[in-house]
């Protein structure tokens, strides 16, 4: 069988505002000073195990030029541009049915573009094993990460009975409260849901037909227009009436043939500044200086992200985020990620808001 990959790259990364903006969201940024963005790093990782021509990027139409600039290896037809955001189920369906037009026999890996994986060899081994599993089983496979703490920002997968690293899924639980998360971790029966999926083409098409028939019918009917000049224009009509639903709610929590591969490969979804801080290099006082130049006096446990060539002199802060992009400077407690959307909204309502976008 031929292996394909769908990289989902349409998010806006609003919790990393103002470093991440709607014009340049986090998947296009170099978070760790490696010279490669999160999207480029994801692509590099996948290109080790499958042909470049079988890697598809699904993103918003506004990001076409950024993707082409960052991934010149791709042909334009490998970049699938959504006219509007409709969550992950339509995003995945768009790519699946486009692959279906090309071949009737494939295994598919679906990955987000903005996650961190520190042990790439372990990840690739798990993926190769997973592709073999879905090749020989009518199964929807998700990768579960062994939890290291009672995290309330992740979804959890409960393992079913069995032996070995791949088990039937018993239940999904989305973002539990702290007490429940502690119970999950202590039980040893729950893994974090990494949002990384594997399945055969036939299995996922059958799942869409069974659990999301309206979405399936729309993208199946659209088949004659894939890779034609009419694709972009007519896709507006499809998305305008498409249900806004995640693949987790639409398929994973309903299907009876869902399995989880227990995994450990240094994974983080990089969803907040706090999660970034845990992974970043820090000085002797716990300050994570990501970029820019600083003079620090009596500071502890801060995150500092400045544009190249900018200097900040900081005295007496502990547990703060100091970040600037363009003309916008944000200084706030580093655990205030729940307020990021409100900050961005308030800035957008300023009379001169265009000066700060």
Image: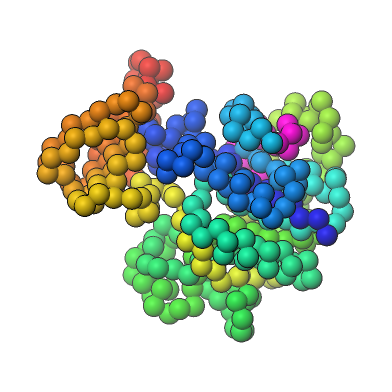
As displayed, is residue 116 above or below residue 229?
Answer: below
How many numbered marks does the figure carry? Answer: 0
Range of magenta residues: 74-91
Nearest the viewer among 220 and 262 is: 262
Pick the quarter of the image with the C terminus. Answer: top left
Percent of width and height locating residue 125: 63, 65
Q: Does the magenta stretch include residue 274?
A: no
Q: Where is residue 299 in the image (x, y as percent from the top left)?
A: 16, 44
Camera-side residue of 99 and 130: 130
Q: Nearer the viewer, residue 281 or 327?
A: 281
- Relative image position of residue 45 (x, y in whole percent): 60, 51
Work out which quarter of the rendered image holds the N terminus and state it.
bottom right
Query: Quadrant of residue 306 in the image?
Result: top left
- For residue 146, above or below residue 102: below
Q: Can residue 268 be seen in this view?
A: yes
| Residue at left offset 72%, top offset 64% | 131
Q: Vertically, is 176 above or below 35? A: below
In the displayed structure image, the side of residue 125 where residue 344 appears, left or right: left
Q: Is residue 232 left or right of residue 329?
A: right
Q: Does the magenta stretch include residue 83?
A: yes
Q: Which of 145 and 308 is in front in this view?
A: 308
Task: Quadrant for residue 175, please give it.
Answer: bottom left
State the residue at coordinates (46%, 42%): 34
Left or right: residue 56 versus residue 333 is: right
Q: Where is residue 282 in the image (x, y as percent from the top left)?
A: 29, 50
* Residue at image location 84% in from the left, 40% down from the top: 223
Residue at x-position 34% and y-position 36%:
291
């Amino acid at each position: 069988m031929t292996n394909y990959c769908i990289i989902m790259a349409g998010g806006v990364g609003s919790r990393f505002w103002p470093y991440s903006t709607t014009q340049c969201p986090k998947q296009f940024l170099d978070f760790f000073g490696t010279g490669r963005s999160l999207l480029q790093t994801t692509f590099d990782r996948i290109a080790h195990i499958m042909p470049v021509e079988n890697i598809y990027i699904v993103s918003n139409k506004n990001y076409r030029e950024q993707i082409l600039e960052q991934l010149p290896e791709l042909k334009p037809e490998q970049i699938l541009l959504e006219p509007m955001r409709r969550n992950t189920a339509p995003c995945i369906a768009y790519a699946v049915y486009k692959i279906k037009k090309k071949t009737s026999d494939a295994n598919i890996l679906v990955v987000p573009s903005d996650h961190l994986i520190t042990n790439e060899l372990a990840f690739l081994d798990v993926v190769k094993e997973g592709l073999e599993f879905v090749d020989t089983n009518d199964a929807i496979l998700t990768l579960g990460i062994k939890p290291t703490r009672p995290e309330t920002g992740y979804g959890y997968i409960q393992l079913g009975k069995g032996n070995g690293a791949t088990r039937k899924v018993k239940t999904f639980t989305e973002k539990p409260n702290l007490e429940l998360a502690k119970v999950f971790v202590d039980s040893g029966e729950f893994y974090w849901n990494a949002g990384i999926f594997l399945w055969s083409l036939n299995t996922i098409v059958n799942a869409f037909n069974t659990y999301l028939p309206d979405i399936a019918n729309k993208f199946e009917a659209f088949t004659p227009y894939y890779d034609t000049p009419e694709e972009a224009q007519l896709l507006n009509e499809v998305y305008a009436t498409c249900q806004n639903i995640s693949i987790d709610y639409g398929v994973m929590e309903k299907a009876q043939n869902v399995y989880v591969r227990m995994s450990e490969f240094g994974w983080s979804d990089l969803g907040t500044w706090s999660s970034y801080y845990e992974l970043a290099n820090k000085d002797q006082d716990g300050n994570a200086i990501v970029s820019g130049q600083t003079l620090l006096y009596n500071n502890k446990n801060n995150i500092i992200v400045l544009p190249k060539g900018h200097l900040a002199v900081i005295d007496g802060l502990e547990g703060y985020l100091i970040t600037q992009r363009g003309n916008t400077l944000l200084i706030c407690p580093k655990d205030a990620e729940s307020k990021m959307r409100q900050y961005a909204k308030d800035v957008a309502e300023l009379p001169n808001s265009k000066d700060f976008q």
